Amino acid sequence: MSCRGGWWWIRATRSRLSWISGRAYGTGGGAARTAYAEEVEPPQPFHLFRTELTEVVRTYAEDATYPVVQVWKPGEPVRTLKRA
């Protein structure tokens, strides 16, 4: 996964491409970080953060000809845009 300008590219195949957009917030120290470290035993040092998704976009080709874009935002249904 890579990040550029608030967009995280998460998966690409020959016929599909997906992005997620959002914000990441560091959790700092505290009980959550301690509990996570005890459960998972990550390599040290590590950063713990929570994410807030603002948009997910998926593109693919329908019948290998027509481009389709699906867009999801929190609290909204998935929008599908097709070019005929």
Image: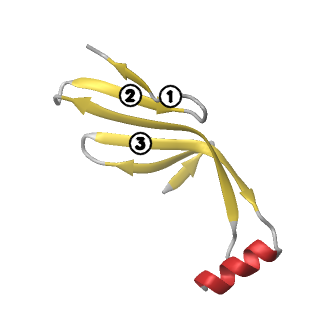
Question: Residue 33: percent from the left, percent from the top?
Answer: 74, 75
Number of other residues with Cα within 10 Å of mark 1, as a class: few under 14, some 14 to 19, many 20 or more:
few
Q: Is mark 1 on a helix, strand or loop?
A: loop
Q: Do the residues labelled 3 and 2 touch (CB within 8 Å)?
A: no
Quadrant position of residue 73: top right
Q: Name the amino acid type tagged 1.
A: Pro
Amino acid at dot 2: Val
Tell me which label, 3 or 2, sits earlier in the chain: 3
**Residue pictured at 40% horizontal, 37% vertical:** 58
Task: Relative to 12, say whether 76 is above or below.
Answer: above
SS under mark 3 = strand
**35 left or right, relative to 66:** right
Q: Nearer the viewer, residue 57 or 36?
A: 36
Q: Distance between the residues labelled 1 and 2?
A: 14 Å
Q: Quadrant of residue 67?
A: top left
**Residue shown at the point (32%, 26%) measured from the top left:** 68
Q: How far apart are marks 3 and 2 (CA)?
A: 10 Å
The residue indicated by pointer 3 is 18
Going from N to C along the chain, the mark reached first, 1 or 3, is 3
The circle drawn on residue 77 is 1
* Residue 24 seen: yes
**Residue 69, which numbered label?**
2
- What is the x, y in percent for residue 35? 71, 79
Q: Measure the C-alpha gap from mark 1 to mark 3.
A: 17 Å
